[in-house]
Image (spheres, rainbow, N blue to C red):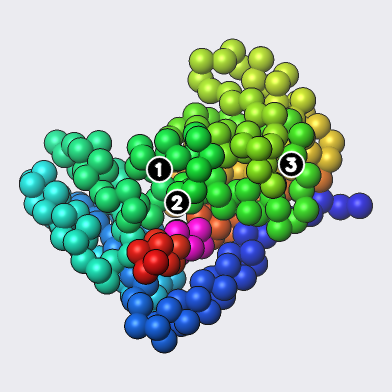
Amino acid sequence: MGVVLLDGEAVAARIRAEVADRVERLRAEGITVGLGTVLVGDDVPSERYVALKHEDCAAIGMYSVGEHLPATASQQEVMDVIARFNADPRVSAFLVQLPLPAGLDEERALLAVDPAKDVDGLHPVNLGRLVLGTPGPLPCTPSGIVELLHAYDVPVEGRHVVIIGRGVTIGRPLSMLLSLKRPGCNAAVTMLHTGVEEHDVAAIVRTADIIVAAAGRPALVTPDMVKPGAAVVSAGTSWEGRKLIPDVREDVAEVAGWITPRLGGVGPMTRAMLLRNALRAAEMSAR
């Protein structure tokens, strides 16, 4: 039996269709579901990513509004936009696209976002809810990974998951989410990082039933590191010229039982969960 591709685009399309249906039903009740974005500066990947988010909103009939400030914007100008989005009833949830230009305080900006409108699920209040296992918006990439595994019937509960990378957007929240005692999670989780000796990393990864590579290091995971039949998720990427390089080498597919494709794996899931978070924020505010 060959490897199963974890097709994130196919699963994301189903999620977008579900969100579109609920957005339309809310609109019929006079409720607007809206996504806001705050972009500062001229970082090309950030500009493209924000543009994709607005394209997704347009495709499903969700209202969206973006504020693009120049790289010379002051901290106060950024804070003013955040305050405006916090107060705007048409903006159900929004995000401040990172990185911000040098000289701006990212932490101050993120803390100013109303936790109820935190579409990324990364506000300290919402990360605290994740730790406690109480309801709140979940970080988009971690929740998208869990949803993708579930969609392809990858056994997670009671299994050993190894996450490579401890970043605040993927590794750390994913480790907390997967270890929660809830359906589709409840796993034994090991998180690896740069403080672990390289030969130990390979030995630990070989014990995993599920591997999530989120380090941003090209071809970090090689076939000899993968237990036959394991599920392998590439969540980290880097650029080689204009080519996007995943953390997982392509020939890992010869060993794995499930694997994300080089393109169309985790990325579409992250954007789909962003739309779902915006929808749920609108539903919560309408109660």
Q: Which residue is mark 1?
A: 126
> Secondary structure under badge 3?
loop
Q: Tell which residue pokes out farthest to the front in this image.
A: 287
Gap in Å between the C-alphas at discs 3 and 2? 21 Å
In contact (CB < 8 Å): disc 3 and disc 2: no
Earlier residue among tags 3 and 2: 2
Q: Which residue is mark 2?
A: 137
Gap in Å between the C-alphas at discs 2 and 1? 7 Å
Q: Nearer the viewer, mark 3 or mark 2?
A: 2
Hey, which quadrant is residue 32 in on the image?
bottom left
What kind of residue is marked 1? Answer: Asn
- Main secondary structure found in the magenta portion: helix
Tell me residue 59's x, y (percent): 45, 78
Earlier residue among tags 2 and 1: 1
What kind of residue is marked 2? Answer: Pro
Q: Which residue is painted at 53% across and 30% down in the image?
A: 165
